[in-house]
Amino acid sequence: METGKKGIYIIESLIISYIVTGIILCILAFFMYQTKSGMKIANIGITLTYIIACILAGGIAGKKMGKRKFLWGMAAGFFYFLILIGISFWLHPGEALVSAEKITTLLLCSAGGMLGGMIA
């Protein structure tokens, strides 16, 4: 398989996963508004959204690649995290570069992508 096609497959999986992320976050915001939930529920919902989106991205990438699906899934989860952290730094430039929360998110995104790749 050509290197260019691999990149396109990863980008395609990330676009789809970010569309799903937007939809899930809108549903979460509506749910929180209706129930007047606190930040604890929001943080759980956001974490689950990341995991679901990365499983989806990993599954799409793994299915398209055919071989070493779990590695391509993990790569999709990792790139999902990189985009997420890049947007975060762009919106909040003074934030700490490394924190326990960011490392946990990196591990969850990578593991979710790997799981999606294995399921594909």
Image: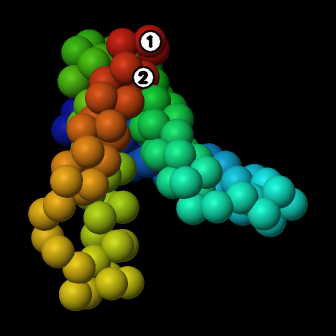
Tell me the residue at 23%/79% (across/down): 95
Which residue is drawn at the image coordinates 36% and 73% (left, top)? 87
Q: Tally the marks.
A: 2
Residue 34 versus residue 103 in the image, above or below = below
Q: Residue at x 36, y 13 (%)?
A: 118
Separation of marks 1 and 2 at Cα, in angstroms: 5 Å
Residue 78 place in picture, x, y as percent: 25, 44
Residue 41: percent from left, percent from top: 61, 51
Residue under label 1, please give it. 119
Residue type of the residue flagged with mark 1: Ile
Is there any visible trace of residue 64 in the rendered image?
A: no
At mark 1, the secondary structure is helix
Three-letter residue code for mark 2: Gly
Residue 76 badge:
none
- Quadrant in which the N terminus is drawn: top left
State if disc 2 and disc 1 touch (CB < 8 Å).
yes
The residue tagged 2 is: 116
Packing grade of label 1 (10 A; few <14, some 14-19, many >=20) is some
Is residue 107 positioned above or below 72 on the image? below
Quadrant showing the C terminus? top left
Q: Is residue 79 left or right of residue 57?
A: left
Indicate the position of residue 64 as horizontal and vertical percent values.
Answer: 41, 25
Report whether residue 48 is seen: yes
